Amino acid sequence: MLKTLAKSIREYKPASILSPLFVSIEVVLECLMPFVISMLVEVIESSTPTMGEIWKYAGILVAIAVASLVTGTLAGAFCARASTGFAKNLRKDLYYHIQDFSFENIDKFSTPSLVTRMTTDVTNVQLSYMMIVRLAIRAPLMVVFSFVMAFVMGGDLAWIFLAVVPLVAFALFAIMYKVMPTFRRLFHKYDDMNESIQENVSGIRVVKAYVREEYEKEKFGKTSTALMKDFTKAERLLAWNDPIMQFAFYGVLSAVLFVGSYLIMSVGEPMYNVARVSQLIVYGMQILSSVMMFSMVFAMIAMSGESARRIVEILTEKSTLHDPDDPVFEVKDGSIDFDHVDFKYSPTAEKNVLEDIDLHIKSGETIGIIGGTGSSKTSLVNLLSRLYDVTEGSVKVGGVDVRAYDLTALRNQVAVVLQKNVLFSGTIKENLRWGNPDATDEELVEACKLAQADDFIQSFPDKYDTYIEQGGTNVSGGQKQRLCIARALLKKPKILVLDDSTSAVDTHTDALIRKAFREYIPTTTKIIIAQRISSVEDADRIIVMESGRVNAVGTHEELVKTNPIYAEVYHSQMKGADNEN
């Protein structure tokens, strides 16, 4: 896990090394300061103090303070650069890796979970790395150097610290050990909360239409309350840290003052004086505060361990789809062959989604696909652009198995307008150029005319420079569908798949789109998945799907006469149309 995460440090390695180096120097300087102060106090308390000696020690103190300030500032600056840079690289690596995932990989991790991993989990790992680079180095070094200086100045009196520190450390680490299972549970609850937020925001229109705001508030409140309870439990345990430290500090302070005063006043021990005992207390404070600091570092590292595991789980996930060793880069034509294809979404699934699909489509044909909900129409076309791989059999495009193609080359020639149309925030031009970044303005207009989108675009004040809000919320469903069709056409594909992509347009516009396809892209193979018979009735052939199988293939006239499923849909829709008239 550490090896995988370390790959994201990259150009921030120098900063990650320089920060601990300056921290080490800073610790040494801070540990020298009480020693020099005690020397200065001894000179002042001596019977014959001279200004020369006083200025000497004062100058040394100023030099140490300035050097400590400089090294501390540099350590902080390099630590900030190292931790934020590491987090930037980690988010970038996660994002890039997710882009290469197949649909099967994405199905494995929920979207809210992926968002949590790229935000909350990366932030936790960043904080942990910051502590490792700086505090995890500072705390143990401070303990070691403070102990050394305590023995130098206080002799046997320093054993008081050595006796107390293990007890304090044990108590603090016991608290951290109890807290960690609670922290681990929090991340799964973060996923649940993000999922609740995502569902609500993306479906806000439905929520308001059904007046379910109070229900959604209550559902979110339960998730938020569960998160609060776990945090409260963790904070309640962590709250013991401060009283334990206060008890230990004042206990050590009392012991050092009592024993030190006894040695000074009663025994007359020559190595002990007020200056040394007072600075010995300073070292005790440094030791105990460093132990507490280290316990907090340990807690943060332990808490972020779960975050790190979740991040590494993504980074080590291998895409189920990959380019072959010697890929084919040219798609010859739009011919399609399904050779006895079986398919299921998961290797562990008991039942196939598609069963024994044997279809052969010529390049340039217009194919309609009709079927009820759950008949696996979308699953069938997903195999063309290799969004998933077949379980058995093969899918060929242009006479070549899709698994033999370079993925980019294949997907550039198989344009799919999905059931859920997605537009991104930006201008209409920017959205259209997703299909072809190099498309000219003339090509944009031509594609939009084919998709029957040009008319409504021209009605906007800014025309093709009209800004599309995130998700295309400022255009209608039919307008969104036509823009997505135009975007797909700009790819100039060999195969164009419309997955129920004209459901939101009227039948007249639908007919104009199909007419434009026949006249302007006759060599492109067109596959139209639709619920309306009118959208596919003029297709060269129509495929009737039922429960993941091909029930029938034929022309509109043939299927009306011979196929009960198709005939029933056709007559029910014709009856509905007659009733409307």
Image (cartoon, rainbow, N blue to C red):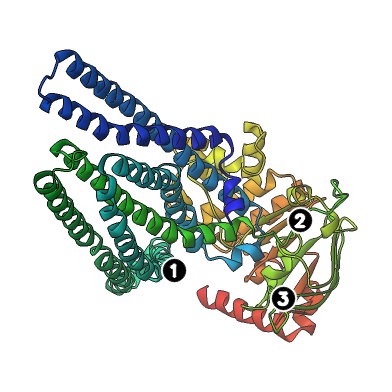
In terms of depth relative to the viewer, which is nearer, 61 or 525? Answer: 61
* Quarter assignment of residue 233: bottom left
In terms of depth relative to the viewer, which is nearer, 317 or 68? Answer: 68
Q: Which residue position is annotated with label 3?
A: 347
Give the spatial CA distance, label 1 vs label 3.
26 Å
Residue at the top extreme?
A: 52
Mark on residue 188?
1
Report x, y in % for residue 292. 30, 54
> Residue at the location (35% across, 57% down)?
295
Residue neighbourhood size for the residue with mark 2, other residues' Cα within 10 Å, grouped as few (<14), some (14–19), many (≥20): some
- Please say if 143 is above or below 218: above
- Of the two numbered discs 2 and 3 on the same chain, state the one appearing first in sequence: 2
> Residue at the location (34% across, 60% down)?
166
- Please say if 572 is above or below 422: below
Q: Are dots 1 and 3 in contact, CB under 8 Å? A: no
> Which amino acid type is marked by label 1?
His
